[in-house]
Amino acid sequence: MTAPAAPIRLTPAIRAMLRGMRRRIRCYVWVSGLAVALALAGMALAGEVGLEVSSGADTPLADTAGGWFGESAGRMVVAVASEHLNDVLDRAETVGIATVVLGESGGSNLRLGTTVTVDLDALRDNWRDRLPGALSSGNLAE
């Protein structure tokens, strides 16, 4: 038995941005209350493609464990084909949403600045096998 997913309450600005952009936006993850790193890992796994994400002084995402794994309200990660990037950025600006381009998809690693680099196969194996393995051994610390 699974619990029903809680509905996402998108702000009027985000709804306005998404309106008319459905064909340009490949996917999005509402990150409020979720670490950016977890959202990016989920996107990489779902898309079966690596991500190269930068951070640093010129972005609001600090290249630290706190920057990648800390939680903050009102954020969204959006995947956009490069040919549609400017359209989506323009639309976001028009409706008053601040944006930061974090990086690009491709390759076989999830690379988050200089803090985290993990092979996508290892990430997938860990995600798929960790909980069943721990439950079958009776040791959730594994």
Image (cartoon, rainbow, N blue to C red):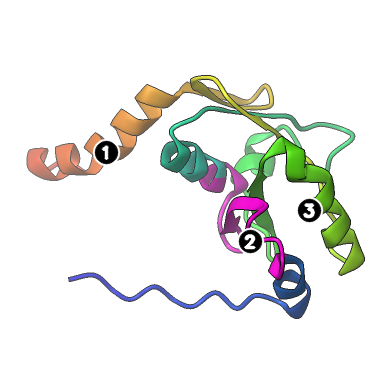
The residue segment tinted magenta is 18-39
Residue under pointer 1? 128
What residue is at 46 percent from the left and 39 percent from the top?
47
Residue 105 vertical placement versus 109 (above, below) = below
* Mark pair 2, 3: CA separation: 10 Å
What residue is at 68 percent from the left and 59 percent from the top?
72
In the rendered image, which quarter is residue 140 located in? top left
Horizontal side of 60 relative to 44 (left or right) equals right
Residue 102 visible in the current orientation: no
Label 3 crowd (10 A; few <14 / some 14-19 / many >=20)? many
Residue 77 vertical placement versus 58 (above, below) = below
What residue is at 56 percent from the left and 56 percent from the top?
34
Residue 26 located within the stretch drawn in magenta = yes
Horizontal side of 23 relative to 3 (left or right) equals right
- Mark 2 residue type: Arg
Callouts 1 and 2 close, C-beta under 8 Å: no
In the rendered image, which quarter is residue 93 located in? bottom right
- Mark 3 residue type: Val
Residue under pointer 2? 22
Q: Where is residue 134 in the image (x, y as percent from the top left)?
A: 18, 40
Residue under pointer 3? 88
Residue 24 vertical placement versus 94 (above, below) = above
Q: Observer-nearest residue: 115 or 9?
A: 9
Earlier along the polypeptide chain: callout 2 or callout 3? 2
Quadrant for the C terminus, please: top left
Earlier along the polypeptide chain: callout 1 or callout 3? 3
Pair 1/3: label in front: 3
* Mark pair 1, 2: CA separation: 30 Å
Label 2 crowd (10 A; few <14 / some 14-19 / many >=20)? few
Q: Observer-nearest residue: 53 or 46?
A: 46
Residue 29 located within the stretch drawn in magenta = yes
